Image (tube, helix red, strand yellow):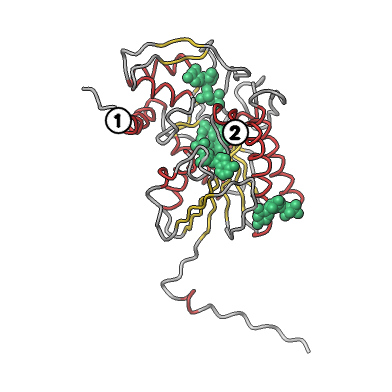
Amino acid sequence: LHTTKPAPTPSPLRASKFYQANMRILVTGGAGFIGSHLVDKLMENEKNEVIVVDNYFTGSKDNLRNWIGHPRFELIRHDVTETLLVEVDQIYHLACPASPIFYKHNPVKTIKTNVMGTLNMLGLAKRVGARILLTSTSEVYGDPLVHPQPESYWGNVNPIGVRSCYDEGKRVAETLMFDYHRQHGIEIRIARIFNTYGPRMNIDDGRVVSNFIAQALRDEPLTVQAPGTQTRSFCYVSDMVDGLMRLMEGKHTGPINIGNPGEFTMLELAETVKEIVNPKVEIKMVENTPDDPRQRKPIIAQANKSLGWEPKVKLRDGLPLMVEDFRQRLGVPKKN
Ligand code: NAD
Ligand code: UDP
Ligand code: UDP
């Protein structure tokens, strides 16, 4: 005889006012620059529980000091190249050194982090049915022959250069994401992040905005790498976090460019930092590193259309916020 099961009655806990439909969110690389700002934003929502996994290669517990000990927060020292067993609903996969001096320091580890780390997070997403977002990079466009760069551009990347561990690593990570999506039906999101700046950047990580600000505060010459006419587009970190969260919550897999289309030459950037931070500082031309992309600027029409996103903070407004943070961390008093 055929009987239908009665619909389950809601559990008394669910009906009680103490129940919260918590969303468990894993942030890999959450002790880093962008990751820690993302955690701040995710923790603002009382329904979110956040688990950070980080090996502290370039990140620091200090970036998460506001949350350590909080009942909805957990910090795990773990390397994503190893298997990870946690139960979560969403994964923001950021773990990977982002600054050239760090990712070139141990290139084999960098490519392992990109390939094995992303594979492990996809294996985890598959096992628990989580949605996973990868922070890819504008470096997948290499030294672009198309300018500005739309998502449809396949890039111009040297497969055997000193940057390849990072840019080819991220390209494989994107491939893995799409293969798991097509083969296993995993829900994926891919952000192609363009240069991002803001408080909590590593002071001595060699990236241009952090270098110039630290140099200006220390009265050291701003080191513009030749020829100085190469361009970048700089996005303030709060705009970046907003874009990443919209992408995660939206319907589009991407890849989607997230960046600020305001384009500056490195000489212009140096002049701007000089004007804002220390008008007396010298600007010095120094030798460049191999394979430095000559230009970079995102087309963000896709993010605008499918996520309703656009950056709000202009370079001239974002720089002073970062200067304040660097001033405190470097112990440089304000001059009147
Ligand atoms: P970051 O170096 O500050 O943060 C990366 C974090 O990942 C650090 O906390 C580091 O300790 C951790 N990590 C590195 N390898 C790990 C491993 N094997 N296991 C566990 N943790 C590991 O860098 P960020 O600027 O915050 O970048 C975050 C993400 O955004 C990266 O994936 C990066 O590639 C991407 N991205 C950043 C930029 C940018 O301008 N900042 C541009 C493009 C893409
Ligand atoms: N993995 C993980 N956590 C999980 C499930 C899988 O870290 O909860 C890792 C696992 O160690 C494996 C990778 O993810 O190396 C890929 O997993 P998948 O199940 O897709 O492949 P398989 O284990 O069959 O090779
Ligand atoms: N750069 C510079 N002076 C510095 C550090 C970097 O002129 O002290 C230049 C570098 O040559 C590159 C640009 O700034 O053209 C951006 O470099 P960064 O390492 O910040 O990021 P990425 O190359 O990954 O975009």
Residue at image location 52% in from the left, 27% down from the top: 261
Q: Quadrant of the N terminus?
A: bottom right
Contact (Cβ within 8 Å) of mark 2 with mark 1: no
Q: Quadrant of residue 98?
A: top right
Can I make out residue 232 in this image? no
Q: Is mark 1 within 8 Å of ligand 3?
A: no
Tell me residue 84's x, y (percent).
62, 54
Can I make out residue 139 in this image? yes
**Amino acid at dot 1:** Gly
Tell me residue 175's x, y (percent).
72, 40
- Classify 254 as above or below 17: above
Choose mark 2 or mark 1, whichever is in front.
1
**Amino acid at dot 2:** Thr
Q: Quadrant of residue 125?
A: bottom right
- The answer for how far apart the CA atoms under marks 2 and 1 are is 32 Å
Q: Quadrant of the C terminus?
A: top left
Question: What number is the disc on residue 108?
Answer: none
**Residue at the extreme right:** 1
Question: What number is the disc on residue 137?
Answer: 2
Residue at image location 67% in from the left, 50% down from the top: 122
Give the mark nearer the N terminus: 2 vs 1: 2
Foreground of the two, 297 or 36: 36
**Residue at the extreme bottom:** 1
Q: Which residue is mark 1?
A: 331
Q: Is mark 2 within 8 Å of ligand 1?
A: yes
Ligand 1's image quarter is top right
Assess disc 2: are there few (<14), some (14-19) or many (≥20) residues with their C-alpha within 10 Å of its C-alpha. Answer: many
